[in-house]
Structure formats: structure tokens, C-alpha cells
Amino acid sequence: MSVETSGEAVSVEIDKADSDSSCQVSDHVDDEAEAAYLTGWKLVMIVISLQLTNVCIAIDVTIIATSIPRISNTFRSLGDVGWYVSAYLLFIAAFQLFFGRLYAFLNKKWLFISCIFLFEVGSLVAATAPNSAALTAGRAITGFSASGIFTGCLTTLSTVVPLHKRGLFIGLVTAVYGIGSILGPLIGGALTDHVTWRWCFYINLPLGGFTIFILIFFLHFPKSPVKEHKDWKEYIMCFDPLGTILFAPSIICLLLALQQGGTTYKWSDGRIVALLVVFAVLMLGFAMVQVYMGDHATLNKKVVFSRHTACAVLYSLCVSASYFVMTYFIPIWFQAIQGVSAVRSGTHLLPFIISNIVSITSGGWLCSKIGWYNPFMFAPITLGTVGAGLIYTWGIDTPMSKIIGHQILYGVGVGLGQQQAIVAVQAGSKDLDIPSGIALLCFAENFGGAVFVSVAHNLWANKLAKGLQAVANINAVQVVNSGATEITNLTSDPATLRAIRVAYKDALARPFLVAIILLCVASIGTFGVDWKNIKPKEEKAQDDENNKVNEKPEGEEKSSSVEKTKDDGDVANVDKSEKSA
């Protein structure tokens, strides 16, 4: 682990080996020096628009949860309900790296606006869907565009805000994701009951329209310093289309196998085996393409082979995956153990969500204030791990006061360090490489969440099935299919009900253990990232000057004390002479 200081000005250099590439920087450009950073009300409007896009993406993940029963009744498509959520999440993960490549070479402003517009189109398709297939297609379109919005939000912040202030603004923009996740089921339930489930998708249209209006008039990116391409074929190769064609379906196959393996189908089922084989073949092909494409590859070699960036990505993957696992399974604990409704379980999760949001914003502000992101990256592996460990100990009779306190401890611990990896990647990357680094980081967060929630779900489901088999006078399959909120309707015997809840409690300990292990693994990334001071050169110079003033050299201190002793002696001799006289 090395310690470095990085000023505001980051010059973009051309590697000698890359000098002939048509997709590289054409000149030495100091983007930090040339970029006109926004201030005042213009910056406020941009931040609000970015927050709205994050809220829309977060709401779209969870808003459909409470409306699925009504949708399945409308289309008579109970077998398709899983795709309404999966299509959205799968496309977010599959195309994240592709958009990182696009943001590196296309006009960032209009690409970002196009992603938001496409998100609106997908929402409109879903809202007006005449059948289940059209709804699934709309969800896939919104997922595809959301992957570009993720990268676009953070790329925009890296352009309109100087490096030493990005921690604060990244916290302000990303913290609202948690708010959207909580509001989603509540808004979805209200719209479904009082209007129609179609308004769960119509609601995105005014929010997206306002965001596009703000971005068109107030967002300006500096011109991308890219060489003139020789012909259109060579220019297209800059985006690595073959790599995307191989990578996207490979990720979709893997996630489908993880979601359905061990639950819908056995791991030995031919469909699961086929998905895993296709994933392996396509991923091998993608790796070969990346080696062959060199500088045109989707995975930027300067980003991928940087220890600093690799450790930041590992850290972000583990912390985000731990967060998603807890967000998914804590409400199930409330529903099964305390017997509350799905909506009520969401309100019981508020101590975790609120503390997480506050600490994300506070961590960003403190990072901007002191100039170092590294200290806050230790919070998840210390406070967060302790909080997750306490959640792991929850029992049927655990008082609500402890449950609230444990959630707050975990939320604060994870929140303080949750977004610091984004600052770390930006601080350790040249300006042209920032979109690729951000895309890789966003992919790690979404991919890690999808994979480890599936892993935790399989561990939980298998443990629950075994635990319920030991309970007398119940049908284990019926209990599992009924869901956590229907436990009290399955039996009137208190002893049997308690035994079912004990089985749920023991099974839910598995996902909580996964969250703990993930935070422990995140420590590898914490210790691997470089220590970089993100303050401007002027502030760092002032800090160094203040330190020099406050810290006198040892020799100077000794000479001062000797002079002071000598002066005191002279004064004493004078006093003695006056007394003798």
C-alpha cells in the first residue's frame, strides 16, 4: 500500500505503445484545469436532477413488488412474474461495462440524456403493455438504459465538481437510492390500490422529463480529447462490439443459473447445467477478445491491471453485496419472526435505511473536508462487521430496542464507507479512464448484489426446507410456498407456530453470515488501495505550511530552552547585584 498525493490538475498522458491507436488521446490535455466547474444554483439543479434519476432507478427495482399480484391477474401470467423483476436487473448488470466504453468516446452529455430518454421509453412500453411479453420487454429496456444512467450520474459529477468535493456530492446523489428502495413498495401499493398498476411506470415520465430539461440547459462537458478516426469501421471497433456480444449474454446466463438453481430447478437439472456451460464458453471467448483487442477492449488494461483500482472494485463489490443481502433478508425476518405485513416490515427497516443514508452523506462530507477517503473505508469492516454480527444473533425473543440499535450500527458502518471506492477510483485514474473505472465499479456493485443475494437465497431456502421437515403436523412445501407473511394463517397451535418461526430464524442466520463474510473479504480491498490526498494543491501547501509552523525542529527547541535558561540566569544575577547594593 503506497501513500500518494494527487492534486486537482491531472494531465492525460499518451503511452508510447498506444500512440498509433485511433481511440486514444490526441494531445496533452489538463481536463481539471480546463473544466468549468459549476457552482451556486446551477450546481444545485444538476444535483437535484441526478438525485431524481437515482430515485427513479431505485423505485423501479421495488415498486413492482406490491403490484405483481394485480399484474398477473390482468395478464393471466403467473408463470412470468419472475421476469418482471429479473429482466430489469439482468440488463443493468449485463451492459454496465458497455456503457463505460461509450462514455469514454461519445459525447457524454447527449449519451446521458439519451439513456434517460430510453428509460422513459421503456417505462412507457411497460405502462401501456397489452400483454405480459410487452411488459417484460419494457422492463428490459429500462434495465438497459439504467445501466447507462448509473455510469452517467457519476461521470457527470466528475465533470461538474472538483475532485476534493466529489465525496460530498457523490454521497448526496447516491444516498437517495436507499430512499427510493423504501418508497417503491409503498408507492406501488398505493397506486395499485387507488389508481392502476400501470401508474407504477407512468410515474417515471414527469420525473425523467424534468431531468432531461435541466440537463439540456445546464450540463456542459468539456470536449473529449480523442484522435480523429481513420474510417468508420475502425471507429466502431473502439467500442468493442464483439466483446459486448459475448459478455452480456454470459452474465445473463450466470445470473439466471444462480437465481433458479437449487430453488426452481435442481443444480443437476439440464437447464441449469446448460446455462453454466454457456456462461463459461462465452466468458472464455470474451477473455480472448479482450486480449486480442488490446487498447480497443471493453476492459481498459490500465484500469483492470491497476492494483489500486482492482482493490477498490473488490471492496465495492463486497460492501454493496453485504448491503443488498441485508436489505433483502431483514424484512423477511420481520415478516416471519414478528408476523408483520410486507409494508410493516419496510417501516421496521427504516432505522437501517435512515442511518445508512445519513452516514453516506456524512462520510462524503468528511472525506471532502479532510481530503482522505481511506479512513472511512475501514468503517464497514469494523462497525459494519460488528453490526452484522449482532444481527446474526437475533432470536425470536430479541427486544425491539436491540434490533433497532443493531440496524443503526450496521447502517452507519456500511454507509460511511459505501461510496468511498468511487472517490478512490476517480483519484487514481486519469480523466479519460474515469468512465471505464466508474463503469467497472458500478458493474461490481450490481453484479455482486445479484450474485450474493442469489447465493444467500439458496442457502436460506435449503436450510429452511430442512428445518421445516423436522416440524410435526405441517406440510413443509405448503409453508414455503405460502411465504413469510402467511405463517400465522397455516396453524392455530402456538407450539407449532413457534417451531416454524425457529426454523425461519435458523435459516435466516445463513444470509446474515454471508453478509459478515463479505465485509471481512472487503478488508483486502481496504488495505490494498493507495492513500491519496484529494485536496487541491493550494490547500495541501497551506496544510504543510501550518504543520511546519506548529512543529519546530528538535534542535531549535533545545536552543530556545538554552537561551531561556541563560536569560533566566542573567535576570537572577541582576537581582542579586541589586540586593547587595
Image: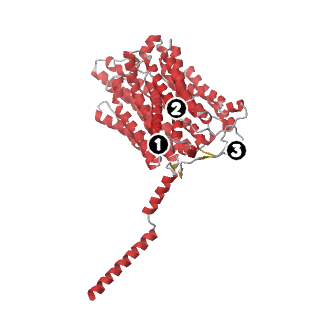
Q: Which residue is located at x 32 percent, y 81 percent?
A: 572
Mark sitting on residue 167: 1
Q: Are marks 2 and 3 in contact (CB under 8 Å)?
A: no
Give the residue type at disc 2: Phe
**Rendered position, 466 above or below 550:** above
Q: CA distance from mark 2 to mark 3?
A: 40 Å
* In the image: residue 406, left or right of residue 137: left
Assign a secondary structure to mark 2. Answer: helix
Element marked by disc 1: helix
Q: Earlier in the sequence, mark 2 or mark 3?
A: 3
Q: Secondary structure at mark 3?
A: helix
Residue most toward the bottom? 581
Residue neighbourhood size for the residue with mark 2, other residues' Cα within 10 Å, grouped as few (<14), some (14–19), many (≥20): few
> In the rendered structure, which amino acid carries the disc numbered 1?
Gly
> x, y (%) of residue 232?
71, 30
Q: Where does the image place residue 73, in percent across and percent down from the top left?
A: 43, 11
Q: Horizontal and vertical percent for residue 525? A: 51, 43
Sequence-wise first label, 1 or 2: 1
Nearer to me, 437 or 575: 575
Q: Does residue 10 sit above or below 150 in this rendering?
A: below
Residue denoted by label 3: 17
Give the residue pinned by disc 2: 217
Q: Is residue 506 something that shows in the picture?
A: yes
At label 3, which amino acid type do we have?
A: Ala
Looking at the image, residue 301 sits to the left or right of residue 567; the answer is: right
Q: Residue at x 38, y 33 (%)?
A: 353
- Residue 184: x %, y % from top left: 41, 25
